[in-house]
Amino acid sequence: MGFQEKSNIVMLTALAVAYGWYGIQVFRLATDEPVSEVMYQPLILIVVVPLVVIATIGHIVISALDPAEADSSDERDREIARRGSVVGGWIVSIAAFGALLAAMAEITHFWIAHVILAGLVIGELADGAWRLILYRRGI
């Protein structure tokens, strides 16, 4: 398993853990009070710090385990990254359109923000998952 594949696994794990925690916290808040009163903004900022820390520590560990391989990539890695980005980009585009429709329908900021956030997170998870599939199956 090459560095880029390991890096992809680290990012998938970090995203899943950080935003899984975020989703649980927001769901708890949204069930206790009306969504228009939920203070989700601090949680979004709070989730970013652990995400960066987890990703940074993970990359340091995989780099330290095989320093010669760290940051190496070849044509296959670049093609897999391109294909993954296309999948993620489609999801982000669909979510952006959904957020636009929600704004035009004058839905609360809570839902608009979460449509955008969900699009970004699901887009990144789909990107990473597709890359992992391409690494495993080959291109």
Image (spheres, helix red, strand yellow):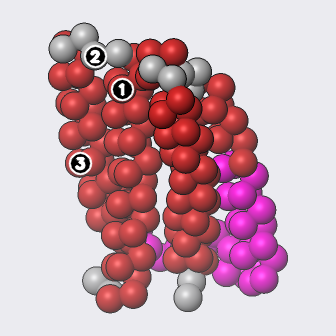
Q: Tell me the residue that label 2 is attached to.
A: 107
Q: Is residue 69 magenta?
A: yes
Q: Position of residue 85 (x, y in %)?
A: 34, 56
Q: Earlier in the sequence, mark 3 or mark 2?
A: 3
Disc 3, SS: helix
Residue type, numbered disc 1: Trp
Residue at 60% x, 50% y is 21
Residues at discs 1 and 2 in contact (Cβ within 8 Å): yes
Question: How packed is label 3: few (under 14 Cα within 10 Å), some, or many (20 or more)?
Answer: some
Secondary structure under tag 1 reads helix
In which quadrant of the rendered image does the N terminus lie?
bottom right
What residue appears at the point 33 percent right and 87 percent down from the top-left corner?
138
Question: Is 47 left or right of 104, judged from the image as shown?
Answer: right
Reading the image, the residue beneath label 3 is 90
Q: In the displayed structure, would residue 22 be above or below residue 56? A: above
Which element carries disc 2, helix, strand or loop? Answer: loop
Residue 77 magenta-highlighted: yes
Label 3 vs label 1: CA separation? 20 Å
Measured Cα–Cα span from mark 1 to mark 2? 7 Å
Specify the quadrant of the image occupied by residue 113: top left
Q: Which residue is mark 1?
A: 111
Question: Is 45 situated left or right of 133 in this image?
Answer: right
Q: Nearer the viewer, residue 132 or 25?
A: 25
Q: Cβ–Cβ below 8 Å for labels 3 and 2?
A: no
- Mark 1 is surrounded, within 10 Å at the Cα level, by few (under 14), some (14 to 19) or many (20 or more) other residues, namely some
- Residue numbers of the magenta segment: 51-78
Within the image, what quadrant is residue 69 found in? Answer: bottom right
Q: Is residue 75 placed above or below 32 in the rendered structure?
A: below
The residue at 28%/83% (across/down) is 139
- In this view, the residue in front, 56 or 27, is 27
